[in-house]
Amino acid sequence: QVQLVESGGGLVQAGGSLRLSCVASGSIFSIHDMGWYRQAPGKQAELVALITSVGTTNYADFALGRFTVSRDNAKNTMDLQMNGLKPEDTAVYYCNAGHYGPQGDFSEYWGQGTQVTVSS
């Protein structure tokens, strides 16, 4: 089992910045792609950013130019730097990771989420 724990959420004014972090722990063999997703009240969850094990990134259109995803494979961590925050960025942000076990078995894990609230 792999556990993902997010941190760094909070309340910020529009135009401000936050840095979210996700730490993976547990029986880690090989973490594959990692990503950030978010879900606003009354809306479906949506992808924010993805990062592969070799550092290739992919962003949702709304995140381009404002958000930067990074990871440290040695520490099993992933960060999301969010700049120029807007009220519409208000949501619970979730960390996601794909994991391969020693037998090649694949599992997907989610964190518990961290609330980001952007005031106007």
Image (cartoon, rainbow, N blue to C red):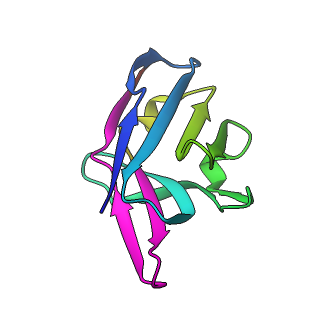
The quarter of the picture where the C terminus appears is: top left
Q: Nearer the viewer, residue 116 or 29?
A: 29
99 versus 76 height, above or below: below
Residue 101, image x, y percentages? 44, 75
- The quarter of the displayed image where residue 17 is located: top right
65 sits left or right of 81 in the view: right
31 versus 19 height, above or below: below
63 sits left or right of 6 in the view: right
What residue is drawn where x is 54% and y is 27%? 19
74 sits left or right of 56 in the view: left
The boundaries of the magenta stretch are 95-116
In magenta stretch: residue 96? yes
- Dominant SS of magenta comes to strand
What residue is drawn where x is 30% and y is 63%? 1
What residue is drawn where x is 74% and y is 40%? 65
31 sits left or right of 72 in the view: left
Residue 35, image x, y percentages? 52, 56
Q: Nearer the viewer, residue 68 or 79?
A: 79
Q: Nearer the viewer, residue 96 or 41?
A: 96
Residue 63, image x, y percentages? 63, 45
Residue 42, image x, y percentages? 25, 52
In magenta stretch: residue 89? no
65 versus 44 height, above or below: above
